């Protein structure tokens, strides 16, 4: 079994060691660098399947590096940040990060996010039927089945679900979702998003109060998780 | 800037008071002797000296001397003075008025010094308690981590797997404690620096409450959690992150101070531009002597167990007040503590339309 290659760009040796041990134990190939410059070179020489990027690097702002990487690198980038600032996280997501974790994070959580991000980037884009645990979405018939029962979705609900599903594992900011579904003039009208997310959860989650598919990223946005544990 | 406008105000009030009192005396100058006017003006300057700074008082002294001389001392409406007695009076008036101003200013200067010294003393005392509490809160988990990892590294062959695991668990719990403390200290410094600018946005209260409850799943597992929300709860416009942290701190507090398996209730409602979240527990509540102080920084109630430096609740209060809200606590014997957060917020009863 060939596991994916993961590039770690973090200036803290203990964190790199921890990540190295954790990821190697899961049979990922690990490359690690401690500076933005080395990270960029490593990524260009041996393009990895996923990058774990720490935002606080000694030689260059992590956000700037993120922008540079996104000029050519399209596979998942998960941002690690020691500062739990909503603005910084939203900026990283706007700059093309797929997901973020704030330090300290649990390795279990990290591995779940990595799996989810890699799963998506490998997925067959052309498969018209997508399955997530007890959910089955038929993209051609525009139908959702939950536990094999047809679930009626309104046009907006379906559009929202589709957007989330097509960006599985990726944190979508409130603004982004509002622009995509309701259009630019609505990008600050978050009340629509709140109501429709609540509504959608009632239709697709087993327990809408403990959602496993539509995950809240506090103050930032929403993330669709395909696995239903 | 503010200081300068304040000084200008002082000069203006000095001029206005003296000319005002002078005018009133002038109106009655036919009924009162001009020497009584000197005493009235002197009284005015003395009163000003109690309130104003040195230079405005000196101005009042000078101005009142001139007014007295020009309008009252015969011959009136000239600065000329006929009798030597009146010259002496005027000179003495001026000196007394000046002394008045200078002495009062000095007294106030020393009072200020004494106040500053007292404040410094209180700050030092606060720092002492703070450092005591902090060094204890930091050293305990660090000792645990060092001790446990030392033991694990020693490769003691006799150490059963069960103990090995419990040492690792100790390391984990100690780290969590350090993490919580760090979060609290960072949040407190955010509050103290005035760095908090609430960003109100539409929130689904149910989503907010369950996000906190789900995230705290592990910590709350020792207790029973009951969430009761009314149907048709409107959306409320408030800062999701700050409000989340408030609820987080209240729940951590409730878990820490109530016996295992006891019930913690969370409820919320919103009406009339007001959003209310309530957290009540079925513990022993707070002692009457603790109640007025529990939101104070670094205050820890007498019967609080180990752990904590008394920051959680004061951060909760700070985050609620940053949003213009209030937090109150009640405690009745036998019913536990009851926290109530009220935040003024726009409400929205938006319903998803049937769009097909």
Image (tube, coloured by chain):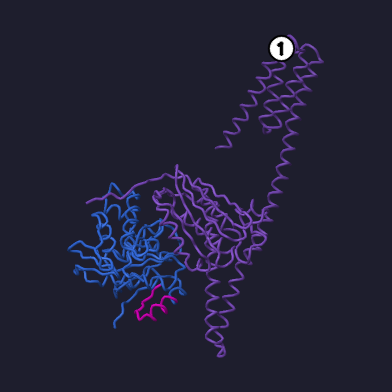
Q: Nearer the viewer, residue B258 or B114?
A: B258
Disc 1: which chain? B
The quarter of the image holding the N terminus of chain A is bottom left
Q: Is residue A147 left or right of residue B223?
A: left
Point 43% across, 52% down: residue = B230
Colour for chain B in the figure: purple
Q: Nearer the viewer, residue A121 or A72?
A: A121
Image spot of residue B345 (x, y percent): 44, 45
Point 40% across, 71% down: residue = A110
Q: Is residue B223 magenta?
A: no
Residue at the left extreme of this rendering? A140
Would you place residue B40 above or below residue B197 in this image?
A: above
Image spot of residue B26 (x, y percent): 69, 13
Q: Is residue B97 left or right of residue A112?
A: right
Residue under circle 1? B28
Colour for chain A in the figure: blue
Q: Which image quadrant is residue A118 in?
A: bottom left
Tell me where the magenta segment starts and ends, as one range: A18-33
Q: Is residue B14 left or right of residue B345?
A: right
Q: Nearer the viewer, residue B13 or B334?
A: B334
Q: Is residue A27 magenta?
A: yes
Image spot of residue B325 (x, y percent): 51, 46
Q: Which image quadrant is residue B111 in?
A: top right
């Amino acid at each position: 079994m060939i596991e994916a290659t993961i590039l770690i760009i973090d200036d803290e040796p203990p964190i790199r060691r921890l990540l190295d041990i954790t990821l190697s134990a899961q049979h990922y190939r690990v490359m690690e660098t401690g500076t933005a410059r080395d990270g960029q070179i490593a990524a260009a020489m041996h393009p990895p399947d996923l990058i774990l990027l720490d935002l606080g690097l000694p030689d260059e702002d992590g956000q700037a590096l993120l922008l540079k990487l996104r000029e050519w690198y399209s596979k998942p980038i998960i941002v690690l940040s020691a500062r739990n600032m909503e603005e910084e996280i939203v900026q990283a997501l706007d700059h093309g990060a797929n997901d973020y974790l704030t330090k300290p994070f649990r390795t279990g959580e990290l591995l779940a996010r990595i799996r989810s991000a890699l799963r998506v980037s490998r997925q067959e884009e052309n498969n018209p039927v997508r399955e997530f645990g007890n959910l089955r979405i038929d993209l051609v018939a525009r139908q959702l089945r939950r536990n094999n029962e047809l679930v009626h979705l309104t046009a907006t609900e379906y559009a929202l679900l589709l957007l989330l599903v097509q960006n599985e594992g990726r944190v979508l900011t409130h603004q982004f979702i509002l622009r995509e579904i309701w259009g630019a003039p609505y990008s600050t009208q978050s009340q629509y998003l709140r109501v429709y997310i609540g509504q959608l959860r009632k239709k697709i989650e087993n327990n809408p109060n403990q959602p496993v598919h539509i995950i809240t990223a506090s103050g930032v946005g929403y993330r669709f998780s395909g696995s239903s544990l | 800037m503010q200081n300068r406008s304040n000084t200008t105000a002082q000069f203006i009030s000095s001029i206005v008071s003296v000319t005002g009192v002078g005018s009133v005396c002038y109106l009655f100058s036919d009924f009162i002797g001009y020497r009584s006017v000197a005493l009235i003006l002197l009284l005015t300057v003395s009163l000003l000296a109690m309130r104003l700074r040195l230079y405005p008082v000196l101005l009042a002294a000078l101005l009142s001397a001139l007014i007295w001389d020009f309008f009252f001392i015969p011959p009136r409406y000239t600065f000329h003075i006929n009798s030597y007695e009146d010259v002496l009076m005027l000179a003495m008036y001026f000196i007394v008025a000046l002394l008045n101003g200078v002495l009062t200013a000095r007294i106030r200067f020393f009072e200020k010094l004494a106040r500053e010294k007292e404040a410094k003393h209180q700050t030092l005392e606060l720092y002492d308690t703070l450092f005591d509490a902090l060094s204890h809160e930091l050293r305990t988990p660090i000792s645990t981590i060092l001790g446990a990892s030392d033991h694990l590294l020693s490769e003691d062959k006799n150490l059963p797997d069960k103990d090995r695991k419990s040492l690792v668990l100790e390391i984990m719990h100690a780290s969590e404690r350090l993490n919580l403390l760090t979060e609290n200290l960072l949040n407190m410094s955010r509050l103290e620096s005035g760095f908090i600018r609430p960003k109100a946005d539409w929130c689904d209260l149910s989503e907010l409450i369950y996000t906190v409850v789900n995230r705290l799943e592990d910590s709350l597992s020792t207790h029973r959690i009951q969430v009761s929300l009314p149907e048709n709860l409107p959306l409320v416009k408030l800062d999701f992150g700050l409000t989340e942290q408030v609820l987080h701190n209240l729940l951590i507090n409730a878990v820490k101070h109530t016996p295992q398996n006891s019930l913690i209730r969370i409820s919320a409602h919103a009406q009339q531009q007001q959003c209310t979240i309530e957290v009540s527990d079925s513990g022993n509540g707070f002692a009457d002597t603790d109640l007025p102080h529990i939101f104070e920084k670094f205050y820890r109630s007498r019967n609080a167990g180990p752990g904590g430096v008394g920051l959680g609740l004061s951060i909760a209060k700070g985050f609620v007040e940053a949003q213009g809200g209030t937090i109150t606590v009640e405690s009745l014997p036998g019913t536990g503590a009851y926290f109530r957060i009220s935040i003024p917020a726009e409400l929205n009863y938006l319903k998803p339309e049937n769009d097909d």
